[in-house]
Amino acid sequence: MSTTTTDLQNEIDAIEGSHISHNDHHHGPEKGLMRWVKTTNHKDIGTLYIWFAFTMLLIGGAMAMVIRAELFQPGLQLVEPQFFNQMTTLHGLIMVFGAIMPAFVGLANWQIPLMIGAKDMALPRMNNWSFWILPFAGAMLLSTMFMQGGGPAFGWTFYAPLSTTFAPASTDYFIFAIHMLGFSSIMGAINVIATIMNMRAPDMKLMDMPLFVWTWFITAFLLIAAMPVLAGAVTMMLTDRNFGTSFFDAAGGGDPVLFQHIFWFFGHPEVYIMILPAFGIVSQIIPTFARKPLFGYSSMVYATASIALLSFVVWGHHMFLAGMPIGGQLYFMYATILISVPTGVKVFNWVTTMWRGSMSFETPMLWAVAFVILFTIGGFSGLMLGIAPADIQYQDTYFVVAHFHYVLVTGALFSIIAAVFYWLPKWCGRMYNEKLAKIHFWWAIISVNVLFFPQHFLGLAGMPRRIPDYSLQFADFNMISSIGGFAFGASFILLTYIIVDCIRNGEPVKDARVWESAKGLEWTVPTPAPYHTFDKPPSKELILAESSHIHVEGVH
Amino acid sequence: MLGNRFLLHPKKVSFFFKSLSFLPLFFISQNAFAEFGLNLPKGVTSISRDIYGLHMLIFWVCVGIAILVFGVMTWSMIFHRKSRGAVASNFHESTAVELVWTLAPLAVLIAIAFPATKVLIDLENTERADMTVKITGYQWKWEYEYMNEGVSFFSNLDKASRDATGDAEARANHANYLLDVDNRLVLPTGKRIRFLMTSNDVIHSWWVRELGVKQDANPGFINDSWAKIDVPGVYRGQCTELCGKDHGFMPIVVEAKSEADYQKWLENKKVEQKAAAAAGDREWTKDELMVQGQKVYSSTCASCHGVTGQGVPGAFPAITGSPFASGDIKAHIGIVMNGKAGTAMQAFGKQLSDSDLAAVITFERNALNNHTGDLVQPATIKSAR
Amino acid sequence: MQSRLDYFVPEGSYWPILGSVGMAAMLGGFASSLHGNTAGTVSMILGFGIIIFMVFGWIGQVINESETGTYNLQVDKSFRIGMGWFIFSEVMFFAAFFGALFYARTLSVPWLGGDGNNLYTGEVLWPEFKSVWPLIQMPDSTNFTVPKGIIEAWHIPALNTLTLLTSGATLTYAHWSLMNKNRIGLIGGLIATIILGVIFLGLQVAEYMEAYQHLDLKLTSGIYGSTFFMLTGFHGLHVTLGTIMLIVILMRAIRGHFREDRHFGFEAVAWYWHFVDVVWLGLFIVVYWL
Ligand code: HEA
Ligand code: HEA
Ligand code: CUA
Ligand SMILES: [Cu+2]
């Protein structure tokens, strides 16, 4: 290493000071509401995305509370079966398309330019549009609940013909809401790709990129390949419903199972869209708090890419009972369980990163560790589901519900919470209340397991999913699960308080490097991150010094 | 009212802690486990037992790997923490190690794939059946047809369960709340039975855990599956594919009998069906029609059109004041018998006997706040067929 | 190369929010018009108008910025990447419909006829049905239109293939001319391409009329009609869009826009056109010919 520590320190100091000297040729943010409507700034847009996602999380979570309340006891207590189905459907859709995906796009918006030393996203106006479609699409989706005949009640997987011939009138609004959500995602993904390919600091090679950037890069390709297929599926639904086509109608030579193929060709990559950025986040956080470089950086990249590629060829594991020929079932079984191998590589790499580190457990680390453990448990149940003959007993039971909440809630959602605690001080220049945050963590981690672990038992004991009422033998575990659910739901009230309190009254943070051993270009810009950053790209030396995976002697 | 439901009964709370204490059991005894309804049952067919074996195999493999991975993690979290003065080392790559933990899981997976493949091939082989039952899903009931026997019937959720959805006491007194039906599927033991699954409307899925059979019933297509039941008994299951409003209310009950008992049952059923058909040959009184009509209406029609005929706005039309039920009789008979293609309204002409149809139509025209005074006789239905 | 410092980050803009409002009005209106709501139709048209206004306003601003030298090469590259991957997403959209066609031909229709593991499907449910492709006699045609015939590949479709392939060539000629500073060639090439595009569309309309009026081949003609019209229809829609974009490019060329070494707008449209071309070849082969 030719550069000395002092050179680098000087550069960091210069970057930190730069926002002052640059102020004259930048306008700061506009004032008032129009700032947010018109903005082309990646940080503003990131903020919009994250608040939108948070709002949707509360709405989707409130629906989950309705589900858990109805399932608290056997019998039909609070809601009609049809309304229950609407809750299940909208809960799934809103969590997937409204909460998890936008939250990750928000994090991408905030972090990717900061992490690759770029001025902004590559296509800023389009970036604004990607966001501003979402509130309209979300509103259209939610408005279906108030229409004659009620909202969509056919599950988030909207299998035909329940979603075509037998669906309420509001389904056409649902279809267009999906079109809009998809359009927004595709534009967002194109922006991420263009940013990463074209806006990296000139001296940053692909293999110098932080893993969060890498995982998002790969996710963006998944989005671009998968979302248009979903658009195709809902378009066929639209014409089957309104224009007399027969894609999903055997009488005209179509097949309801065709819908499932198209849906899951999208749907399976979709679930990896919701987990790959999470892998990235965890790969940033663990080295920071283990004070040790990430183990196996390049294998992490290759594993992510393998998972992404494999995700396009395993969709049939959702359809083992749909009547697939045996050859198809065998193939999809083998391909599915193969995904455990690259995923395992990631898990082992994280564990090895912790091994012989010097660990401390600030809140982001707690969430990251919880992610590794609980996601792995979800992965194990996934592997069990992947065994085609065994899936006969699992499919469409609460065992599946338990599986995907372990990977989605304690996987995707936990990683998002970890990311927010990790980067929030950088964003707003204030520290959250560590004590409260730890209390919240333990509260959430216990309740979420009380919520979802018993669902494994329920599934094995024979309780199907998507039912509003059940026989008495399932009563006890359902009650436990509901109690866990209410406790977990209430933990979000505390989380909201912690975050608002941090933004408003948190202890100001002065250090650019909020966490002492964090690596990455985002920690070289001042805290809070100024409105415009990296007008001048970082130097090669700085990039190398800040890369989280190659440890450079002497820097921090 | 509402608050009451959320109040915790002390018994429930104690159960909560009791069941937590069962968690460690998970790792000790599988049998104890099954008794508390925590695990799959072994079941009563070779397939269900094979699946159970596979299930336990993968489960223990996962537990093994979990102990390894979480063990190492816990170790480092305890011993390699800064507060204990741990100093971070600096290694960050090792091709050898990474190769090992790529290949070892691969080997484990291949080892699992062999038995899984074997079981799959076995259960997909539906040739050589001793008898065939065709199962058709409807919103929200099952039809069972014994192929080549001329016996077929519908199986609905039992009335006692339906009445108990809003009544905790009735639920407590019902041994099989939501898992009981009016007509059971009766099957012989020791015979290889082929099931043909299809559907009349949306996708349903027929699942009986103890038989190890679950298969989607797709409209317009037939999927098949098989079972050879070893032990006589009553086995219960449910529809497992979201099929609309009453998806949670279409249970399955299989009663497995010895071959001789099964044959007896089959003969009885045949006689019964003949008698039902004959009932359509005579003139019915209004009272008879109304009583029978009420029965048919509440078991067959009420799930959509409502117990009082009010329907569900935007989804299912009301019968009360309906232009069909209070207008032209022919049109009314027509829609009930032929249904309306492309809607949830099924063609009940194929499902109900002449007398049941006559009864339910008479009922709709003279109850549920309709007062046409018309009578429809089975003979009218017969001639309309 | 210009300095990276000059990467153009636009000021806040009203265009995106306008686009969102237009999109919501148009699609929401469409959904409501499907249920016989006239207000829905009005909203749909209004929303469409807003979108058109937005597209022209937004693109107009981009053209303006481009012509006034606001964009450096790096911005140009972002546009290229964006357009390239946008086209890829379109490919995937078409892939869904091609997939449906493939599935129907090789799986679902044979299964309905009792093939593979669907012996009983054919025997028990559809004993009358014979599986053939193109599917004329459906398993149950009560709700569908039975066509009297299908479109012959070697009539209009072959002609259309020729038309589109030629248009690809004329467009490449235009591009060439642009790079060789031959303005006349550029404009001529573009005009020729547009004319060919319009001819293609005209022939397509004629083919549809033939299908609807003489052959009873309709969108409602079972899976054959569904896949046929959805695939060719979406393709036709893309040709229409492409033609409109070519017209815009032509106007710009006439006004003297585009430099021989930098003309992203031109290239983007050319890529799009070639993409539409390639999709047609796929269509011709699997929809009409095989
Ligand atoms: C973030 C989302 C996410 C993720 C990451 C996964 C990951 C996986 N999923 Fe899951 N899945 C869903 C979301 C997700 N899933 C959802 C939402 C559904 C339900 C959809 C619906 O019907 O509504 C679903 C349903 C689902 C099914 C269908 C079940 C059914 O309906 O019958 C199957 C079947 O194969 C499956 C399998 C898997 C597998 C094999 C993985 C693998 O990727 C897991 C790999 C990870 C591990 C295995 C753990 C770590 C590995 C090691 C420590 C290495 C060593 C391990 C071994 C060799 C065993 N999933
Ligand atoms: C993508 C992410 C995601 C997330 C984060 C969640 C979060 C939760 N999910 Fe869900 N879920 C899905 C995705 C997700 N889910 C999907 C895809 C399905 C399948 C749908 C289908 O079958 O079609 C599903 C289905 C599903 C079911 C099965 C329904 C059925 O089959 O009928 C259940 C049942 O328990 C459930 C519960 C929960 C609970 C309790 C939470 C909790 O984690 C939620 C916690 C959050 C909050 C509670 C909100 C915050 C708090 C407030 C608003 C304050 C008010 C608080 C109180 C009133 C206590 N979910
Ligand atoms: Cu039938 Cu669910
Ligand atoms: Cu999957």
Image: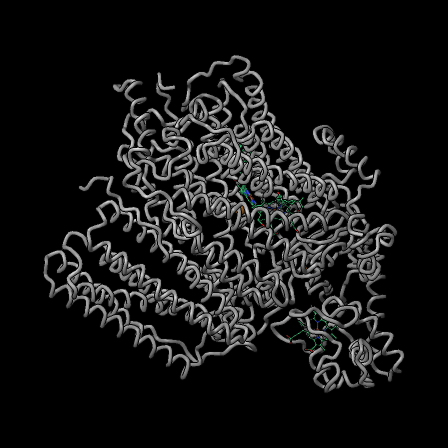
Q: How many marks?
A: 0
Please tell me in which quadrant of the rendered image residue B334 appears.
Answer: bottom right
- Residue depicted at x 67% and y 38%: A453
Quick check: B277 left or right of A365? right
Task: Where is residue C260? Give x, y as percent.
Answer: 14, 55
Residue drawn at point x = 53 percent, y = 57 percent: A260
Residue A136, position as x, y percentages in the image: 49, 58
Q: Is residue A218 visible?
A: no
| A295 with respect to B72 (left or right) | left
A434 and C115: which one is in front? A434
Query: From the image, which quarter does the C terminus of chain C lie in?
Result: bottom left
- Of residue B373 and residue A120, the one placed in the foreground of this image is A120
Tell me if B128 is positioned left or right of C175 in this view. Answer: right
The answer to whether residue C290 is visible is: yes
Question: In this rendering, is residue B11 above or below C224?
Answer: above
Residue B326: image quadrant is bottom right
Residue drawn at x 84%, y 82% as measured from the top left = B281
Using the image, determine if residue C245 lies above or below residue B109: below
